[in-house]
Amino acid sequence: MSSKNRKRTASSSSSAEEPDSEEESRLKDLQERDEFANRLKQRDEDRTRKVVDSTGGRKAIEEATKRLKLEHEDRDKIVPHLRLQSRRQYLEKRKDDKVAELEADILDDEYLFDESVLTKREKEERQYKKQLLNIAKEHEKARELERVQRYRMPQDLKKGERSEYVEVDDFEKQPNSEQKKWEAEQLASARFQFGAKDAKAEEEYELLLDDQIDFIQALTLDGSREKSTSRQPELTEKERKRLTLEETKRSLPVYPFKDDLIAAVKEHQVLIIEGETGSGKTTQVPQYLVEAGFTKDKKMIGCTQPRRVAAMSVAARVAEEMGVKLGNEVGYSIRFEDCTSDRTILKYMTDGTLHREFLSEPDLASYSVMIIDEAHERTLHTDILFGLVKDIARFRPELKLLISSATLDADKFSAFFDDAPIFRIPGRRYPVDIFYTKAPEADYIDACCVSVLQIHATQPLGDILVFLTGQDEIETCQEVLQDRVKRLGSKIRELIVIPVYANLPSDMQAKIFEPTPPNARKVILATNIAETSLTIDNIIYVIDPGFAKQNNFNSRTGMESLMVVPISKASANQRAGRAGRTAPGKCFRLYTAWAYKHELEDNTVPEIQRINLGNAVLMLKALGINDLIHFDFLDPPPHETLVLALEQLYALGALNHHGELTKLGRRMAEFPVDPMMGKMLLASEKYKCSEEMVTIAAMLSVNSAIFYRPKDKIIHADTARKNFNHMHGDHLSLLQVYNQWAETDYSTQWCYENFIQYRSMKRARDVREQLVGLMQRVEIDMVSCLPETINVRKAATAGYFYHVARLSKGGHYKTIKHNQTVMIHPNSSLFEELPRWVLYHELVFTSKEYMRQVIEIESKWLLEVAPHYYKAKELEDSTNKKMPKGAGRAEMTQ
DNA sequence: GAGCACTGC
């Protein structure tokens, strides 16, 4: 480290002729930075949507009333027309989808099964499908040739004219229509079903399984409802709808505390609210505060949520309860979507959005109350918000803060906020009996399957939720269960197995919400997604092996690793709680009570201590917080992580040698990306390739979830992937993927054909759009340099010069700065190329130290883009083998 | 020659 510092000091003094001029340029940069910030602020103010503006807003009001009137008058005329059009579009789209599906189905079928192994019926079916596809294609061709509109709505026909088109629905009304059969088939292939529907439940199979697991009940997670009275299930959806909204509000556990709560908020500046899920605090508390007059003087009440879906759905619910239109008085704001207006007084948002808002409004002046909900989840953003918000509260005594959390952490939050009072609200939950194994289980996947069957055979009906660590485990577990149930045959009741994990297509995810058929049982195999993000009703049994995958960042090596680790007690209890949402439940833990007590940590290590803080540090710097080492964190991140982040920002030129933010840094802070990527985007201005860099940045941020690789079609998927490989590296391959997709007008079909995940691409498109907006914001024009791509790689180097490795003997790479041995990831297009110098996007440790997303660079570029960081001597080559002509020492003479 | 838990801006 000392040598690095020396180098830097040397370079910075050599780049400036005199110390005086260095000081001058620093001051000039600071001035430019502030001017830039002011321009941004001005632009923001101009752009804000003004629905009602007291000063010059008459035009806006007129406009709005006109629009409202128009809307009202024309609605009757427009709506039927719109309905018709949307129906037509839907039919068209569905036809395309179905043909694509059919085609894929035939391909799969032929790939998987040889003609010779098929039965007669299967052969006929294949033939039938092919014929169907041919007809569909012919039809399409004919249509294009003739340019005839085949779909005509009946009323368009003149009298006497015969309709050549029959509504598809007419066929579908018939029982067992082709369409229905087909859909049923599709559905069945996506869901495994075992067991017999009509198996008798009363029959007794005491010792059905030879390898039963012994569980012992250790304790009960207390519910707030009486066991005896809670036997009846909660109100059904229908019954609840019958209650008026007001009655529902009154029935919530938080209601009796309304007046006390308002009084407490009035009396104290900071209040910790401790309440279980289901207490109604998220929806009700903000409404109480509105009623109590906290939104007078045009101030807002803000409420943060850790997840987008939560922010949206809660806002919608509250808007309904208050009888206003979503987006007016009650609104929400999340990335890619701002549904608020000047009239908004109650604003739900994600914690990251509020974090961003700090940049344009560091004192939260437009809020009178800020509620940080689900604080116990300790996301990176909430953790940083704590520090910021605590600071603001000191110089804005009229700002009220509510921190809402689950039970365990309330005391800790209270201590952090200078012993703020805790307000407790009872929850609404049923008791859950907890069972532990007598002895540790060696193979927990097997143990899971056994437990599922054990429950299925011996326990009353009710769905089972199993927590596993990843897609792989879920798939094997699914197979094992399938196998074992098949062997048991019709002796047991029907068992429906449904997998859930984040990367699963959303229509498959939706299956967990389908009601379980009578006399059957649903088993949901889920990752941690079911711990907080997805709430599934009717779960009675939870099986918890006690593991989860966790990402860890090692700041010394700059490497991330994703590892299976034991969960914390807090997490274990959260999982158990999932069994008691609609009725009393049972939780089976596949570890011993002793292990729970002695081997599990109390709480999961908060995110802020586990991840790279580059962007967070830049943002805090942009907020004018200079002394980060002493920033008031609830749990401070490791010292080395902060130092690494600061060092990197300095090397990138975002901080000057006083540790102050430069103009470059201020512009980088505008981007919601890692500082290196921010620098890359800004460098694209110089290299005239902003279009390409924005695309690459967007593709890199959807993080390796682009290529889809189904187990049964690995070869097809890999060939498809190789077609995109670019000789100079993965960034350019990603660029090709995106551009080709864009050329097909963002087609789903194209994604399917090329084994690319449509969802990821759509996300990349969203991110790209946002980045383009931000580029304009920081005053960079969008230009393209294609087909030339050297500048693309140079711009990437300008941001990622920290991430460079050089080939050494034996075909492995050494990073320049840490001299660490690393490898190119086997998925990379350069895996077999082994160029002399490579730049990587990230380092991950899985089975080895891998560089993911790699491009080839030339060492002289490093001197061009980061002369302050690299010295020519460092970049000299010592190896001479496998060196192409013109590379190596020769290029260093420049 | 390997493998991607989950969020969020």
Image (spheres, coloured by chain):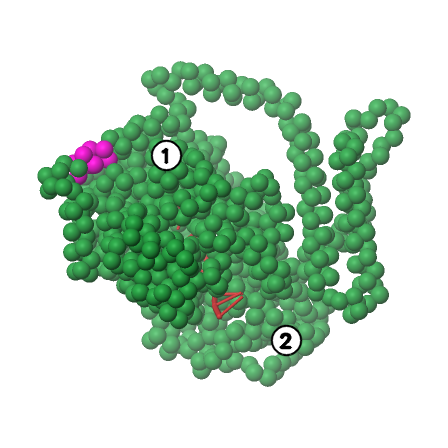
Element type where label 1 sits in the image: loop
Report the amino acid beneath label 1: Ile
Name the subunit of mark 2. A
Give the camera-side residue of A614 and A546.
A614
Figure check: A713 above or below A288: below
Give, as a single range, the part of the protein colored magenta: A26-34
CA distance for labels 1 and 2: 61 Å
In this view of the protein, which residue sits in the foreground, A849 or A517? Answer: A849
- Residue A286 visible in rendering: no
- Name of the residue lying farthest toward the right: A160
Relative to A353, residue A845 above or below = below
| Label 1: how many Cα within 10 Å (few below 14, some 14–19, many 20+) | some
Residue A484, numbered circle: 2
- State the green chain: A
Please name the color used to draw chain B: red
Q: Position of residue A8 (x, y in %)?
A: 19, 52
Tell me where residue A508 appears, x and y as whole percent. Answer: 59, 55
- Can you identify the residue that label 1 sits on? A780
Q: Residue at x 42, y 16 (%)?
A: A59
Helix, strand or loop for the magenta stretch, by majority: helix
Q: Callout 2: helix, strand or loop?
A: helix
Query: In this view of the protein, can residue A594 be seen by the observer?
Result: yes
Q: Quadrant of residue A487?
A: bottom right
* Quadrant in which the N terminus of chain A appears: bottom left
Amino acid under disc 2:
Arg
